[in-house]
Image (cartoon, grey):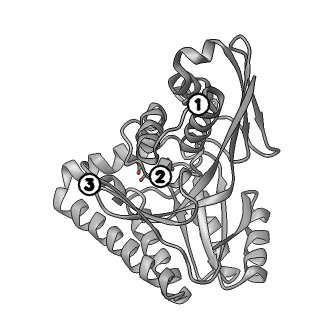
């Protein structure tokens, strides 16, 4: 018997880190992601990576095996599992959440189970927590979404609202190296909060306000405002010490090549993901070429 499941990677357009403190974030599912195939077997595992993608060998890094064990439980002994990564793990592109959701979809298809959307989100968050420690749940929510969402989690209620653009948005997304672990970056912000609670509360409110402004800018297709909001959020995240020189180079290049706005995306830290907003497809391609010349992985996404 055979079954498969897929889920998209993600980019956080606005609101990373702030979402850990109950503020809203805007997340966008990507055209690239993770695919899982299950077949009746004896517990064999294989991982295939798209050209240019590597698995982290950092000590303490979460392995696909850990997420597979958590998602499949006892079923894992009776099936062979093949995982295909189209996005780089540990880089802020949502690979853990995509793997978690793809495993759950494959499992449900294999055993013929139906799971409600709410239960699947809770299950995916529990699996992703193996990789992230306690997370806001934004990545699994995006991996389960069909388009852009505004997500928040106040610790009691998780809210997922669609945030569909009236006209296509042209983004350049990608990653430059791994970010070194979500838990580590979230911990850095938490440490700063313990030293300066009011300052960090206000900083997170500002980032939440940027998400709300961006949601309105998306709804009215105000690309200039959306881009400037992304730039502002990048400056704040940079000030929090979450942006490496390698990513600052990418952001500078994107802006020099005509991006309307550009920022780091996800947890940040050593390297990680980025997103740039382009006026149109031709401009996106020009920005992408500039970023690729730096040696980063980048591609264009049209979001509708
Ligand atoms: O692990 P990443 O890079 O996808 O970041 C997740 C977003 C954070 O806000 C940094 C963490 C969280 O749990 O929301």
Task: Pinpoint residue 301: horizontal percent, then vertical percent.
Answer: 70, 68
Mark with earlier residue (3, 2): 2
Image check: 179 left or right of 289? Answer: left
Image check: 214 left or right of 53? Answer: left
Name the residue located 66 percent from the left edge and 13 percent from the top edge: 78
- Between marks 2 and 1, how big is the CA–CA gap? 27 Å
Mark with earlier residue (1, 3): 1
| Labels 1, 3: front one | 3
Q: Is residue 212 above or below residue 138?
A: below
User: Is disc 1 placed on a helix, strand or loop?
Assistant: loop
- Between marks 1 and 3, how big is the CA–CA gap? 32 Å
Task: Pinpoint residue 60: horizontal percent, then vertical percent.
Answer: 51, 26
Name the residue located 64 percent from the left edge and 34 percent from the top edge: 109
Mark with earlier residue (2, 1): 1
Task: Pinpoint residue 237: horizontal percent, then vertical percent.
Answer: 42, 63
Q: Quadrant of residue 51?
A: top right
Q: Quadrant of residue 45?
A: top right
Name the residue located 38 percent from the left edge and 56 percent from the top edge: 17
Is ligand 1 less than 8 Å from the beta carbon at label 3? no
Query: Mark 3, residues whose alpha carbon is within 10 Å: few (<14), some, or many (≥20)?
Result: some
Q: Which residue is mark 3?
A: 154
| Labels 2, 1: front one | 2
Task: Pinpoint residue 229: horizontal percent, then vertical percent.
Answer: 45, 79
Query: Mark 1, residues whose alpha carbon is within 10 Å: few (<14), some, or many (≥20)?
Result: few
- Name the foreground residue: 203 vs 99: 99
Q: Is residue 223 above or below residue 265?
A: below
Is ligand 1 less than 8 Å from the beta carbon at label 1? no
User: Is disc 3 placed on a helix, strand or loop?
Assistant: loop
Q: Which residue is mark 2?
A: 141
Q: Which residue is mark 1?
A: 58
């Amino acid at each position: 018997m055979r079954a498969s499941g897929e889920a998209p990677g993600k980019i956080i357009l606005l609101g990373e880190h702030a979402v850990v403190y109950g503020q809203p974030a805007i997340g966008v599912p990507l055209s690239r992601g993770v695919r899982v195939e299950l077949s009746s077997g004896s517990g064999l595992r294989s991982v295939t990576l798209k050209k240019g993608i590597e698995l982290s060998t950092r000590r303490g890094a979460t392995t696909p095996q850990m997420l597979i064990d958590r998602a499949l439980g006892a079923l894992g002994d009776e099936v062979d599992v093949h995982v295909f990564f189209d996005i780089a793990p540990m880089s802020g592109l949502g690979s853990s959440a995509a793997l978690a959701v793809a495993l759950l979809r494959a499992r449900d298809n294999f055993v013929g189970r139906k799971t409600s959307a709410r239960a699947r989100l809770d299950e995916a968050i529990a699996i992703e927590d193996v990789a992230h420690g306690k997370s806001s749940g934004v990545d699994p929510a995006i991996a389960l979404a069909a388009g852009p969402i505004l997500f928040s989690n106040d610790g009691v209620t998780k809210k997922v609202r669609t945030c569909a653009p009236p006209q296509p948005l042209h983004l350049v997304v990608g990653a430059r190296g791994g970010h070194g672990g979500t838990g580590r970056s979230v911990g850095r912000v938490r440490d700063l909060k313990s030293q300066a609670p009011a300052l960090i509360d206000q900083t997170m409110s500002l980032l939440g306000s940027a998400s709300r402004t961006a949601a309105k800018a998306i709804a009215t297709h105000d690309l200039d405002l959306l881009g400037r909001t992304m730039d502002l959020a990048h400056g704040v995240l940079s000030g929090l010490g979450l942006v490496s020189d390698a990513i600052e180079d990418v952001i500078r290049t994107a802006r020099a090549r005509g991006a309307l706005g550009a920022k780091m995306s996800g947890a940040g830290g050593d390297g990680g993901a980025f997103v740039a907003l382009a006026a149109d497809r031709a401009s996106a391609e020009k920005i992408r070429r500039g970023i690729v010349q730096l040696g980063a992985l980048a591609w264009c996404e049209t979001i509708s």
